[in-house]
Image (cartoon, rainbow, N blue to C red):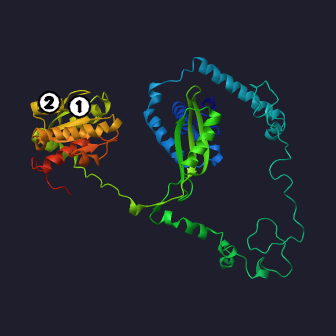
Amino acid sequence: ALRDFFSEFKMRAQQNTRYIEADIEEAIRTHTIDTLISMLTSADIQSTITPDEGRNVPWHYNNIRGVQTVKQTWAALDGIKQLVKLDTDGPLGEMSRDIKERAVAFLEEIVEIGGYFAAVEQGFFVDSAKYPERNGDGIARDGKGGVAADTIVARDADYYAPVCDHFGENHLPEGVAHADDPIGGCTLCKPEKIVYIDELDPEDNSTKRLEETYAYRKGGMIKPEAEWAGDGVILTQFFVPLPEDVAGVYGVEMARKLGLLDPQVVNIQVLQPAEGCFVEVKGKVDFAIDVKDLKVPEKETMLPEEVLREAVRKIGLKVVAATVGEDEHSVGLREILDIKHGGIEKYGVKYVYLGTSVPVDKVIDAAIETGAHAILISTIISHNDVHRMQMRKLADLCIERGIREDLILIAGGTQINREMAKETGLDATFGRGTHGIDVVNAMVKALQARGKIEIPPQR
């Protein structure tokens, strides 16, 4: 409707989300809807997250996370106006015309009664009825009242302020050429006369406060933070099988037992009355960690894609892959293998996939029969450390059969990390976030280490 009236104007509508606590999902939903409306109508809708007016500390990173997610929606909607058309010949057109007619009549009535301020006094705005009907619940304000009412008064004839730049009338005493002459110059023309807060209060000043957080800003000490440097604030999320009124109390007590200071429930969502609640609690940790004490694993050096492809081509790299034991999970391994997911197939690796719940000895048999260079196993189930058992079994059986040096052995799974390769006797192990190129990189480097392939020195 507004577009019809103001088609030549740029338009921005600001829609504040309702007051929320820490529910990032709700913020994302609202942002996404606003983005969709903006793309369809060419109106720039500015939706702002209002997390309980900032009283909730995690608002900053929730805001960033929410915007990052909505960017994906914005990208997906690119060109939607060429694919989708608003049907103005149906109910949408009728609704638009109805709104425009009511809006024009509303503005005409405002003019008739004396203008905007008169309309405010009579409660024209925020009335819950559909104009021209009125429910009488609009917000009315006295035109002579409001913020700072009766605070503007006429200055006395002898009013005088000894400052060189002054807003309004300033009555200089007789014989005074410049207003600040009697005090030898004001702080506007002599900044050195300014008395800073440090000199007034030696204990409560910005310098002291900055000293308290110096180790977290410039030093090597680290605390989680949400609002101030080194404030130690963390947000915990969990599900409890309790009703809403009990879940909040439980959340605070649980946080205390975890050692969190000043715990507060910032969000409770009833997932289903018969199941329980999703709870978010914020609190503070009273410890810091020195970065120098952290043992950070070295980053794996990745060979360039063209080098990996050439190495794979030269040796004709072939692998056998399977989910082992009694594990039926297959999605993760298929993503590592298949070209459509950017798997090892993308880099020219040939593979034989044996499926799920495959005994380890059968995987080894298949590798021998097909002349594979490597075995890739997936093991997701980790009860009683069964994933470690399967990995050790793979290495032990290959040693027993005398083929350990002939095969590259790699395992992956959600409960596996890089350090497990050494403890289980494998060449490489991978956990969450692994991609096909990571596995290819590991296989090519293992082949290079065994002298089966030469890789040109990389700069």
Residue shown at 74% from the left, 74% from the top: 164
- The mark that comes first in sequence, 2 or 1, is 1
Specify the amino acid type for callout 2: Ala
270, above or below 215, in the image: above
Q: Nearer the viewer, residue 171 or 131?
A: 131
In the picture, the quarter occupied by the C terminus is bottom left
Q: Position of residue 326 (x, y in %)?
A: 28, 28
Residue 203, above or below 358: below
User: In this rendering, does residue 13 appear at all?
Assistant: no
Q: Kindly indicate whether the residue at mark 1 contacts the one at mark 2 (C-beta within 8 angstroms).
A: yes
Where, by quadrant of the figure, is residue 408 drawn? top left
Residue count near mark 2 (Cα–Cα under 10 Å), binned few <14, some 14–19, many ≥20 = some
| Residue 119 visible to an observer of this rendering | yes
The residue type indicated by label 1 comes to Ala
| Residue in the image at 65% along x and 23% along y | 97
286 and 56: which is toward the camera: 286
Q: Residue furthest right?
A: 157
Image location (x, y in percent) of residue 421: 25, 46
- The location of residue 60, given as percent across then percent down, is 55, 49
Calculate the distance from the C-alpha at mark 2 to the C-alpha at mark 1: 10 Å
Q: Is residue 348 left or right of residue 133?
A: left
Provide the residue designation for mark 1: 322
Q: Is residue 145 left or right of residue 436?
A: right
What's the residue at 35%, 58% (across, down)? 295
Q: Dividing the image into 4 quarters, which one contains the N terminus? A: top right
Query: Which residue in the structure is indicated by mark 2?
Result: 366
Tell me if 419 is positioned left or right of 182 in this view.
left
Q: Secondary structure at mark 2?
A: helix
